[in-house]
């Protein structure tokens, strides 16, 4: 009887851990198919990203040519840019911490850190909005990068 109770409690605990992991993973997703997350992201993007990356995600003109100060202009986040060449984890990290943390020491970038400015959920939402604008083929290609992790 005691053994059954212990086994039963262990199964309940294992199920609780599995459910918690599933919930946590779902909570931390960047889901371009989630209309609530995408709508929130549209607002976050307009407020915090559009001034550099453009209201239509078009980026700054001539975004591949360095400015006189050595910085590259803000790239587009639509399918013409390179955002979709990176997995979600990298996009989240660069958005949260800024590009300087990931670039070589002499690389110049105006991409700020959003630590203390945007919540993690806001960052995920902005990225979900950006991804929602990409054609299906681009989303599939970018999603394949996520599956490699």
Image: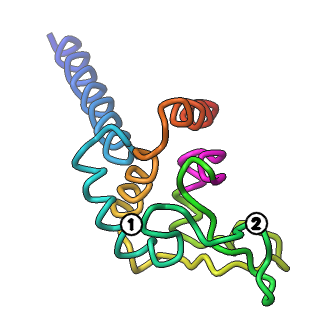
Name the residue that disc number 1 marks. Answer: 45
Whether the magenta-drawn stretch holds residue 87 is answered as yes
Whether the magenta-drawn stretch holds residue 119 is answered as no
Check contact, mark 2 vs mark 1: CB within 8 A. Answer: no
Tell me if residue 123 comes above or below residue 142 in the rendering.
below
**Residue 2 point in image, percent of width and height:** 17, 15
Disc 2/disc 1 C-alpha distance (Å): 22 Å
Callout 2 secondary element: loop
Name the residue that disc number 2 marks. Answer: 64
Q: Residue at x 25, y 32 (%)?
A: 16
Q: Nearer the viewer, residue 65 or 96?
A: 65
Which numbered disc flags the more N-terminal residue, 2 or 1? 1
Q: Residue at x 60, y 32 (%)?
A: 141
Q: How many marks?
A: 2
Q: Residue at x 59, y 30 (%)?
A: 144
Per the rendered image, the range of residues in magenta is 81-91
**What colour-coding does the image apply?**
rainbow
Tell me if residue 11 comes above or below residue 147 in the rendering.
above
Callout 1 secondary element: helix
Q: Residues within 10 Å of mark 1 (few under 14, many from 20)?
A: many
Answer with the quarter of the image where residue 110 lies: bottom right
- Locate the N terminus by quadrant: top left
**Is 67 placed left or right of 60 in the picture?**
right
Answer with the quarter of the image where residue 71 lies: bottom right
**Residue 48 point in image, percent of width and height:** 41, 75
- Locate the C terminus by quadrant: top right
Tell me if residue 127 comes above or below residue 23 in the rendering.
below
Q: Nearer the viewer, residue 19 or 87?
A: 87
**Is 31 placed left or right of 67 in the picture?**
left
């Amino acid at each position: 009887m005691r053994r059954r109770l212990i086994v039963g409690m262990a199964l309940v605990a294992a199920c609780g851990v599995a459910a918690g992991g599933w919930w946590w993973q779902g909570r931390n997703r960047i889901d371009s198919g989630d209309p609530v997350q995408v709508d929130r992201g549209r607002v976050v993007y307009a407020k915090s990203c559009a001034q550099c990356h453009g209201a239509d995600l078009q980026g700054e003109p001539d975004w591949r040519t360095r400015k006189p100060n050595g910085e590259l202009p803000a790239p587009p986040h639509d399918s013409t840019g390179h955002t979709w060449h990176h997995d979600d984890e990298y996009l989240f990290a660069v958005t949260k911490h800024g590009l300087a943390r990931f670039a070589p020491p002499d690389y110049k970038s105006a991409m700020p850190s959003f630590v203390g400015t945007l919540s993690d959920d806001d960052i995920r939402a902005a990225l979900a909005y950006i991804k929602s604008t990409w054609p299906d083929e681009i989303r599939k290609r970018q999603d394949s990068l996520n599956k490699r992790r």
